[in-house]
Amino acid sequence: MLVNGKPYRSIWLEENGPCFAIIDQTKLPHQFVIKRLATLEDAITAISDMLVRGAPLIGATTACGICLALLEDSSDAGLEKACSRLLQARPTAVNLRWAVERMRGVLHNVSPAGRVVVAYREAEDICNEDVEINSSLGGHGVELIKQHQHADRPVNILTHCNAGWLATVDWGTALSPIFKAQEAGIDVHVWVDETRPRNQGAHLTAWELDAAGISHHLVVDNAGGHLMQQGSVDLCIVGTDRTAANGDVCNKIGTYLKALAAFDNNIPFYVALPGSTIDWTLDSGADIPIEKRDQDEVLQVYGTTNGRDITRVKIAPKNTPAANPAFDVTPARLVTGLITERGVCTASREGLLSLYPGKR
């Protein structure tokens, strides 16, 4: 996507290689900082400290991290150590495991001497495929937006967290249909949840929409139900970090409450995801591991007072502890449909199998 008129992906191979570059998302929206990934440790830190986030981008960064690890040790032991280290970086996003398994499968029968070349080629394929997948996903999703067009006002869409191009290599998942709608000349307006505690909606989604010139308003997380009651939301579109085989979806904490409010107000609630985010090994969302992050993410907020220096401030009493579950699970019964690169289906095992036959 464009940043100040220049096209960017969220991760890319440096022009002269072999290192990769990312946009440090912890600095947005106040600073646009490009960070260099030169080692496996750099990739692990980028994932665990959320310089990159979003299931598809975590998967792409994982593949790139394996490339960097093989530069130092391309032996079987080196490959397995890299895979094991990366798998521990973040537990919920299934694309991390998907990328490890894909890279391991491609590299397993390649001699250590030839692994680096093969790894870089596969990582490039993963990144390019992600762009194509999310563009296709957006094409299917925009057809749903078209169903809610009005002659006298924009289509009002509510989203939660960030599932834009910053969460993928490009285009995004939940925001891809919105970007496609803009391209098609459809008048859209987006309600952007702030998404506490890390405020990815405020910091990232609002930044993306502003850069794209798409009408939007930032709202506090608890405003969604009120907006729905007032008839100010036509549909909800969110992303997911892992989808169980029965259609249960795991997304940023607070998604479940939005789905409940949408269900109560008879508002369509869609989840956008690439096929790589489906975990066919899990029968339901009850088995999805929920990441519990550091309490300081809840007890502190950060921002800027002068447009330059980023500052953290405490917002709770000194002796107050915090719990910080990063995700929740929305049951399939509350999901109107799943938007994928292969089309839209019901949130059910049968629906998913209709698009991905042969998976069991």
Image: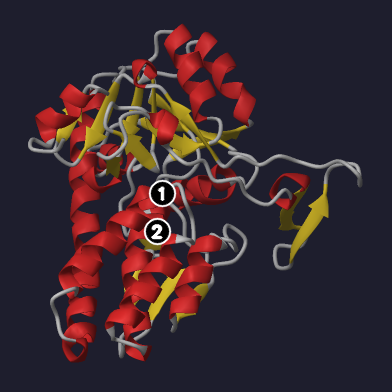
**Label of residue 58 in the image:** 2
- Which picture quadrant has residue 138? top left
Q: Nearer the viewer, residue 19 or 189?
A: 19
Q: Nearer the viewer, residue 180 or 236?
A: 236
Q: Is residue 58 above or below residue 162?
A: below
Where disc 1 sits, the SS reads loop
Q: Nearer the viewer, residue 77 or 129?
A: 77
Q: Residue at x 54, y 43 (%)?
A: 201
Q: Residue 304 in the image: x percent, y percent? A: 73, 59
Q: Residue 227 in the image: x percent, y percent? A: 54, 17
Q: Which callout, 1 or 2, points at the residue further toward the start of the chain?
A: 2
Circle 1 is placed at which residue position?
93
Where disc 2 sits, the SS reads helix
Q: Residues within 10 Å of mark 1 (few under 14, many from 20)?
A: many
Q: Residue at x 78, y 46 (%)?
A: 299
Q: Residue furthest left?
A: 358
Q: Residue at x 39, y 39 (%)?
A: 240
Q: Is residue 132 above or below residue 195?
A: below
Q: Residue furthest right?
A: 318
Q: What amino acid type should be assigned to the residue bearing mark 2?
A: Ile
Measured Cα–Cα span from mark 1 to mark 2: 8 Å
Q: Is any atom of residue 352 visible in this view? A: yes
Q: What amino acid type should be assigned to the residue bearing mark 1?
A: Ala
Q: Residue 341 in the image: x percent, y percent? A: 18, 42
